[in-house]
Amino acid sequence: MRYALHRLLQAVPVFFVTTFLIYAMVFALPGDPIVALAGDKPLPDEVLHTLRERYHLNDPLIVQYGLYMLNAFQGDLGETFTGQPVSELLQGRWAVTAQLAVTAWIFELVVGIGLGVIAGLRRGGIADTAVLAGTTFVIAVPVFVVGYTAQITLGLNLSLFPTAGVDEGWPVSYLLPGMVLGSFGLAYVARLTRTSLIENMRADYIRTARAKGLRRRRVIGRHALRNSLIPVITFLGVDFGNLMAGAVVTEGIFNLPGIGQQVFQSIQLQEGPVVVGIVTMLVMIFILVNLLVDLLYGVLDPRIRRG
């Protein structure tokens, strides 16, 4: 509990500093969102003044941020400049992006660690070479190229997966976009698992375990792989937040109505409250996932929590 509380207290200042910087950057964008809302028709000065007062645009930035966070802690993420609550706007979109991110994350976890273990235990062999070559190729190719290629080949030509939309629900509609979104993280997970496993297989405690006559499966699973997964878990924890935030391109390719698509539209319309609301929630998810990763550290390696 002391270890968990210490990590939780460390996350508090990170949350406030990060959200303030995001708020400042979004509302420091050039242009007046109220004027942009009116389009080509100029608004009367009285209307401009009323709307700016309503959305606190005339207040100092720190006051705007304080009022926003006070409302956010009460579950109110503000309104768009057309009067629609941000929480209502995002209500149906969070589930789409969350399901996409979870699908991609599971794909990274299972396939990435599996490939990394195979390559690490067969260092220098055909499997190791194939994993290294394949992951290098995936990292080098842009996500939109992988997305459109997978959509045309696996979706249209071979008809293995749906090509767009979420009509068939989870997981069918999310398998192909999830594999595309998770392919880059999978490459890093596989390489990281391979490198870490190779290093641990050379360690003294592994030689001691072998000298005691332990079975190879037990030596690898109980000792080598357990310690090798610590850096992998770090990456997977951080990458879950990246998957949530980085779904803009993938959602665009596969026409998924998630928050990535909404962020893109809101930036175009200068809807600052929507962008800040989405990013604030992403920051909270990112911090919570990293807190869970820290706690998993203590489970995998007792020396960490004792330190």
Image (tube, rainbow, N blue to C red):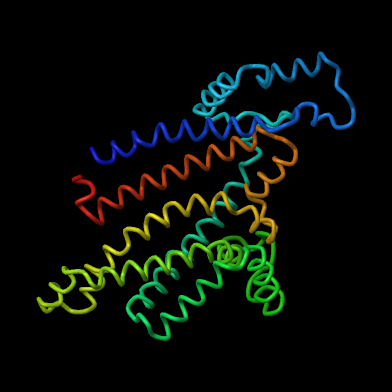
Where residue 90 appears, as percent x and y from the top left, is 62, 41
Residue ID at (72%, 44%): 265
Residue ID at (72%, 32%): 30
If the image is split into quadrants, where does the N terminus sit? top left
Question: Taking 97 as reference, is 146 above or below it?
Answer: below
* Observer-nearest of 49 and 175: 49
Question: Taking 195 as reference, is 276 above or below it?
Answer: above
Answer left or right for 93 relative to 105. right
Where residue 136 appears, as percent x and y from the top left, is 52, 71
Q: Quadrant of residue 157?
A: bottom right
Q: Quadrant of residue 204?
A: bottom left
Residue ID at (23%, 37%): 2
| View extreme (bottom): residue | 126
Q: In which quarter of the image is residue 274?
A: top right
* Observer-nearest of 33 and 76: 33
Where residue 39 appears, as percent x and y from the top left, is 85, 32
Where residue 104 appears, as percent x and y from the top left, is 52, 61
* Observer-nearest of 170 and 147: 147
| View extreme (top): residue | 46
If the image is split into quadrants, where does the C terminus sit? top left
